[in-house]
Image (tube, grey):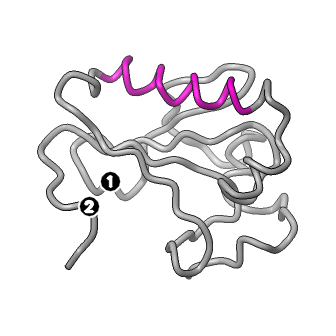
């Protein structure tokens, strides 16, 4: 169910619990700014999620409130995960859903990395 990205951060969301180690995940990367793990319902041969360690509801919240160091660290982490998984040369899709119309389902900023085969059109027509 899509969430309202304008609401305050809820530290009981599933990604906050993954960050705290309360829920297991198949982590493939972590540093001071982000963690990355396999999506539990992959939509492509490679489907990874990258989340910041900070309490940000959405890309909008992150871009407005995060310090420059957090933004740079997170963006670099996303790039590193893509490179580490061999996605750059063949190409990949980077997706961040925001709010109800964007289809955001978890109230913690997360970026999807899709790859491993041609992905087709960006949006269903």
Say what secondary structure mark 1 lies in: loop
As drawn, 12 above or below 5: above
Q: Position of residue 49 (x, y in %)?
A: 49, 44
Q: Quadrant of residue 85?
A: top left
As drawn, 81 above or below 7: above
The residue lying at 67 percent from left, 52 percent from top is 15
Looking at the image, residue 12 sits to the left or right of residue 48; the answer is right
Q: Earlier in the sequence, mark 2 or mark 1?
A: 1
Say what secondary structure mark 2 lies in: loop
Report which residue position mark 1 lands on.
Answer: 42
Q: Is residue 15 magenta?
A: no
Q: Quadrant of residue 52?
A: top right
As drawn, the label of residue 64 is none
The residue lying at 84 percent from left, 62 percent from top is 9
As drawn, 71 above or below 44: above
Looking at the image, residue 75 sits to the left or right of residue 12; the answer is left
Q: Is residue 73 magenta?
A: yes
Q: Position of residue 3 (x, y in %)?
A: 65, 77
Magenta-colored span:
71-85
The residue lying at 47 percent from left, 25 percent from top is 79
**Which quarter of the rendering shows the N terminus?**
bottom right
The residue lying at 45 percent from left, 48 percent from top is 112
Q: CA distance from mark 2 to mark 1?
A: 17 Å
Is label 2 in contact with label 1 (beta carbons under 8 Å)?
A: no
Q: Quadrant of residue 31?
A: top right
Category of crowding for the residue at label 2, using alpha-carbon neighbours closer than 10 angstroms: few (below 14), some (14–19), many (at least 20): few
Q: Main secondary structure of the magenta part?
A: helix
Report which residue position mark 2 lands on.
Answer: 122
Q: Position of residue 7 (x, y in %)?
A: 82, 74
* Image mark count: 2
């Amino acid at each position: 169910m899509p969430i309202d990205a304008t609401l305050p951060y809820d530290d009981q969301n599933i990604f906050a619990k993954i960050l705290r180690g309360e829920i297991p995940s198949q982590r493939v990367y972590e540093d001071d700014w982000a963690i990355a793990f396999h999506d539990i319902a992959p939509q492509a041969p490679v489907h990874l999620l990258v989340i910041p360690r900070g309490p940000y509801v959405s890309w909008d919240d992150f871009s407005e409130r995060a310090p420059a160091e957090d933004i740079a660290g997170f963006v670099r982490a996303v790039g590193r995960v893509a490179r580490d998984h061999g996605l750059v040369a063949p190409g990949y899709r980077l997706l961040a859903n925001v709010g109800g119309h964007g289809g955001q389902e978890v109230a913690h900023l997360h970026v999807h990395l899709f790859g491993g085969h041609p992905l087709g059109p960006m949006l269903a027509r």
